[in-house]
Image (cartoon, rainbow, N blue to C red):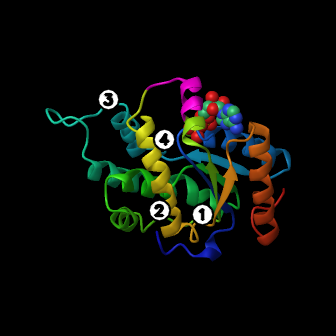
Amino acid sequence: MSAVSDARRRGLLIVLEGLDGAGTTTQVERLAAALKAEGHSVLTTREPSDGPVGVLIRQALTGRVVLPGAGPLAPETLALLYAADRTDHLRARVLPALEAGQVVLSDRSVLSSLAYQGASLPMEWVEAINSHAIPADLTLFVQVSIEVAARRRAARGGPEELFDAEEKQRRISQQYEAAIALRGAREHVVRIDGDATVEAVTAACLARVRELFAREPGRAPVR
Ligand SMILES: Nc1ncnc2c1ncn2[C@@H]1O[C@H](COP(=O)(O)OP(=O)(O)O)[C@@H](O)[C@H]1O
Ligand SMILES: [Mg+2]
């Protein structure tokens, strides 16, 4: 899969990244709506994906899948599951859409693995097991303070996951910086001020997406 040439990539892959509560899910939906209104063909998706390994990961994160008698899955297992899910996600969803010339908006991808799994494992190993991942044409890193992310998670509610505790989020924030240092250029990372209003964040993201469209006029055309 790493042999996918740019020539086969007629569409554009845009990934949103950020701490839990940064607003990536909100912004994927809003960006998709804005781009569709302009006539672009858009696929929204997410990692972990909705494929079989992605479902397993979500169950592990919420404690519904454990090692009998031994508790949560090992960090190594989880990291390998994320990498495996990414393979499936690319094959089943992302590459077909790119080959069809769509704009793919993914809620998280490989930088999340580097940041989250890299928090308890060597980041170089996490990167190595993700060597099949194709780089994004643009990664919008929605940057929020730990406090804002925590407030938004609390307001959102929902099940408490493995990575929710505030101290862990601080560590993940540092890990994101290390991940961006390691792979940010390849993933075309730009930073977006995520502490701003929902509308302002969407506008900032859209400005970056329009710059990308201007740089790649042949890809992801308006129909
Ligand atoms: N820029 C923003 N300002 C205020 N609230 C926001 C903003 N972005 C998202 N939210 C709210 O914060 C919560 C978390 O947003 P969400 O998109 O689920 O974050 P993520 O997917 O990054 O974890 C949601 O309730 C959402 O409505
Ligand atoms: Mg989300």
**For the view shown, which residue lies furthest in the left direction?**
69
- Of the numbered discs 2 and 3, the one sitting upstream in the chain is 3
Q: Which residue is mark 1?
A: 136
Residue 91 in sight: no
Separation (CA) of disc 2 from disc 1? 18 Å
| Mark number displayed over residue 64 | 3
Q: Position of residue 49 (x, y in %)?
A: 49, 45
Q: Residue at x 65, y 65 (%)?
A: 137
| In the image, residue 152 lies in the stretch drawn in magenta | yes
- Of the numbered discs 2 and 4, the one sitting upstream in the chain is 4
Asked if marks 4 and 3 touch (Cβ < 8 Å), the reply is no
Closest to the observer, 195 or 63: 195
Separation (CA) of disc 4 from disc 3? 16 Å
In the image, residue 215 sits, relative to residue 96, either above or below, namely below
Q: Position of residue 34 (x, y in %)?
A: 80, 45
Residue 89 in the figure: left or right of residue 52? right
Label 3 Cα crowd, 10 Å radius (few <14 / some 14-19 / many 20+): few
Label 2 Cα crowd, 10 Å radius (few <14 / some 14-19 / many 20+): some
Residue 193 in the figure: left or right of residue 107? right
Label 4 Cα crowd, 10 Å radius (few <14 / some 14-19 / many 20+): some
- Of the numbered discs 2 and 1, the one sitting upstream in the chain is 1
Q: Which residue is mark 4?
A: 50
| Mark number displayed over residue 178 | 2
In the image, residue 20 sits, relative to residue 78, either above or below, namely above
Q: Amino acid at mark 3?
A: Arg
